Amino acid sequence: MAKELDRIPIGKVKRASKFVTTGAKVGANYVKAYSKAAIKGKLDKEELDSDNAKDIYDSLSELKGSALKMAQLLSMDQNVLPKAYSDKFAMAQYSAPPLSYPLVKKTFIEHLGKEPNQLFDSFGKNASNAASMGQVHKAELQGEKLAVKVQYPGVADSIKSDLKLAKPFALKLMNVKGKEVEPYMKEVEGKLLEEADYELELRQSMDFAQKCKNLKGVFFPKYYPQYSAPKILTMSWLAGEPIGAWMKRDQAQADRDKLGQILWDFYMHQMHEMRMMHADPHPGNFIINSANELGVIDFGCIKHIPDDFYSAYFELADHDVLNNPKRVDELFRQLEIIKPTDPKKDIDVVTPMFTELIKLLSRPFNDGTFDFSDEAYFSEIYLKGEAIGKDPEMNRLQARGSRHFIYFNRTFFGLYQILHSIKAKVDCSSVDFMKRAS
């Protein structure tokens, strides 16, 4: 694990100065790259991206919180960033530098009035893993193995200012304009504030486990409110291994298909029955036990799905509907893909592009049993995303769609990516979503 941090910049001035310093490093990288290009006659874009990605990630790792969470979010959408950035930022999902134990102890005293070793029979001083918002320590109480999540200092207080400071980096990397993304930034800000509220996460975690208790092949931790607080969340330790480690080992195809089906049915239950979803589907949040069942952790990021968005979204997933131009126009307007002020020439650009994209992404729903190991399918997705990103007309018309798309699409993208990594064949017709959406 990375070297422990003895302090995190908390004040606005200190955090702002960190962004300024990072900007200066990025500027120096450009000077170095273009100086080399002047000699060699060619700009090494990969080296420039790699240097910038390292400097930005190192700074975000020290800042923690929403700054590092943004890196994690961006790493999940490999169409948004150059590969050097997405590869480096993906580390935020698994191996961010942890806090030193004195800071952990200080958090316990402040919120629970006692040191960890006064509450538990044993408490690991070294973090088992550390991510963007907090880190997890192993503990034991009366023979029960526990996972204790401790939030980094200043995370909640710095979210709004961090997003404002990080925004120029994000806009530059994604090549979009500030005003166009304001509603989406507000959506992200709201979700990050929720993730920083461990009391809310405790309630959501217990609620989710209760509503999914009858699902086959899915299990959840037991939660301990008496050992939890606004910055501390205590739960049972789930036996097993992270899905990322599981998928790297040789697995029988039947086991891959079984796990893939469990994942698919779990998410379809959330969307169609609960109208809410675990919107942080990266591999670090799934634990696989010896029976190849799915353990689910981290319910800080829960997206509630409005009925009107749900019905329009899943109606568009029906390829028969996509072949009906009049209905597509109505649904695109409902989902804000087409804006009320759009002239016909803009509608003529947006409509076919989004129709093709939706038809591609909804293919599993329409094919019945779908093979997520299909490299050609995912190459098609990446190429389509790249084509949209390079299309000058689409660049002019960026920031399309309801704010709800952010976490909805993030969830589907994360789910598809995991199913692809598992190489699972899944019966995607297990829920008649078309009938529900109509």
Image: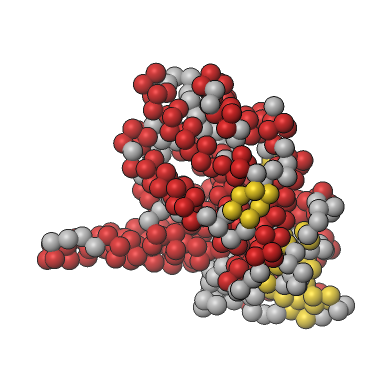
Task: Give the side of residue 174 with respect to residue 306, left or right.
Answer: left
Residue 307 seen by the camera: no
Where residue 208 appears, as percent x and y from the top left, is: 78, 51
Q: Quadrant of the N terminus?
A: bottom right
**Residue situated in front as seen by the camera: 56 or 159:** 56
Where residue 55 appears, as percent x and y from the top left, is: 38, 65
Where residue 202 appears, as percent x and y from the top left, is: 76, 56
Residue at 36% across, 48% down = 172
Residue at 86% across, 79% down = 143
- Colour pattern: secondary structure
- Tag count: 0
Q: Quadrant of the C terminus?
A: top right
Query: In the displayed structure, would residue 202 be above or below residue 429?
Result: below
Can you name the residue that lies furthest to the right here? 142
Where residue 355 appears, as percent x and y from the top left, is: 49, 32
**Residue situated in front as seen by the camera: 87 or 416:** 416
Residue at 53% across, 48% down = 160
Residue 39 seen by the camera: yes
Task: Give the side of residue 438 with respect to residue 47, left or right.
Answer: right
Query: In the displayed structure, would residue 374 be above or below residue 386?
Result: below
Residue at 78% across, 59% down = 217
Task: Give the side of residue 231 with respect to residue 235, left or right.
Answer: left
**Residue situated in front as seen by the camera: 381 or 237:** 381
**Residue situated in front as seen by the camera: 278 or 132:** 278
Quarter of the image where one finds residue 125: bottom right
Query: In the displayed structure, would residue 162 be above or below residue 252?
Result: above
